[in-house]
Image: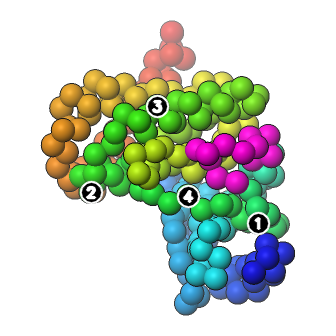
Amino acid sequence: MQISEFKSFIEGSLLPNIQLKTVSPVEPIIVENHTEEWKLLGKGNYAAVFTHPAMPDWVVKIYGRNPEGLQKEIFVYEKLGSHKAYSRLGGYGRSYLILKRIEGITLFHAMVKGIPIPVSVIHDIDSALQYARDRGLNPFDVHGKNVVMNKNRGYIVDISDFYKSGYCSKWDDLKKAYYWIYRPLILKWHPPFPFRAVDSIRTLYRLYRKLRKRIKKAD
């Protein structure tokens, strides 16, 4: 199936049979999938990603809110060009993108399942972020749920915020936790961690960031 045919297939069999709902701007959207063959691969705060067995090398990212962000993400992919640590834009429609599929497990779920995260993954992401900067982009919102590892290599699966200005500390904060806590204390044995425990860390970190912003404003 060619990309042009795939677009028609998406618009005929996927889009009419799903609903994306939102309850909070900081929580993942709610997905209702009434199709049989389309599989929900993942979801974020404003989009959901689907795959179909007829095109296993590609995924479809559908925006459930912030539709103007779709055009900005297209701009980022076009400016990013080709790099092994990023996906590639194959096509797009009014509310969706067709992206090259990246296999692997997120760092978040690696923690939950007790899968060791080697330092090579961290180095790969650092290199990929510098590449984006060299292309005139600003890596933003890079964290454990949009960084994937596969065969000890690191990949970034969400670059939708790379057009933003300013400094985002999420990746630097994650690296500090990796080198100060994870590598010396967890990496060698790495037991599985309950999902709720890892998700609670994510929630506490979000609160920490809000508190840090308030302190900076007060200063």
> For the residue carrying disc 1, how many other residues have a C-alpha within 10 Å: few (<14), some (14-19), or many (20+)?
some
Q: Nearer the viewer, mark 1 or mark 2?
A: 2
Is the residue under label 1 in contact with that under label 3 (CB below 8 Å)?
A: no
Q: Nearer the viewer, mark 1 or mark 4?
A: 4
Numbered mark located on residue 123 in the image: 3
| Residue at x 36% of width, y 34% of height | 119
Name the quadrant containing residue 5. bottom right
| Residue at the extreme top | 219
* First in sequence: mark 3 vs mark 4: 4
Numbered mark located on residue 102 in the image: 4
Q: Give the range drawn in magenta.
A: 76-88
Task: Residue type at mark 4: give it.
Answer: Ile
Residue indicated by mark 2 = 113
Q: Distance between the residues labelled 1 and 2?
A: 33 Å
Residue indicated by mark 1 = 95
Quadrant location of the N terminus in the rendered image: bottom right
- Magenta residues: mostly which secondary structure? loop
Tell me: 104 left or right of 76. Answer: left
Task: Residue type at mark 1: give it.
Answer: Ser
Tell me: 198 left or right of 124. Answer: left
The secondary structure type at the circle numbered 2 is helix
The secondary structure type at the circle numbered 1 is loop
* First in sequence: mark 4 vs mark 2: 4
Task: Residue type at mark 3: give it.
Answer: His
| Residue at x 76% of width, y 66% of height | 95
> For the residue carrying disc 4, how many other residues have a C-alpha within 10 Å: few (<14), some (14-19), or many (20+)?
some
Q: How far apart are marks 4 and 2 (CA)?
A: 19 Å
* First in sequence: mark 1 vs mark 2: 1
Name the quadrant containing residue 11. bottom right
* First in sequence: mark 3 vs mark 1: 1
